[in-house]
Image: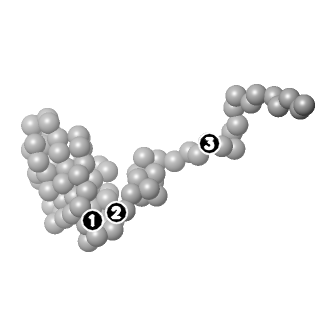
Amino acid sequence: MSVTAMQLDQPGAYQTTTEQALMEETLPLVDTRVLVLGCGAAWTARQFAERYPTSQFIATEVDRVQHAKNLQLDLPNLVFRL
């Protein structure tokens, strides 16, 4: 009977990426509707709206001050809701 040593860390098994890149790899973002919850300053929502012009993005933010700032953005496929 062979004994296999337990390996706690395997650097080759990990992937370093950004949240945006991971979403682009795993989500269908072309010709679709996307709901972004808690968008903050809407950085990710803006990036996606610019990169996927045939999709519709709805971004929500609970902070009224930030929401007012977001409403100043002018992208035809990105709308903001409180």
Amino acid type of disc 1? Thr
Compute the Cα span from label 3 to label 1: 30 Å
Q: Nearer the viewer, mark 3 or mark 1?
A: 1
The quarter holding residue 38 reads top left
Read off the residue under disc 2.
29
Q: How many marks?
A: 3
Amino acid type of disc 3? Tyr
Q: Is residue 69 in view from this perspective?
A: no
Q: Are marks 2 and 1 in contact (CB under 8 Å)?
A: yes
State the scheme by which the image is colored: one colour
Please indicate whether residue 65 sits to the left or right of residue 3 in the image. left
Read off the residue under disc 3.
14
Q: Are marks 3 and 1 in contact (CB under 8 Å)?
A: no
Q: Is residue 26 in view from this perspective?
A: yes
Q: Mark 1: few, some, or many residues within 10 Å (few <14, many ≥20)?
A: few
The numbered dot on residue 32 is 1
Q: Residue at x 81, y 28 (%)?
A: 5
Q: Is residue 24 above or below residue 63?
A: below
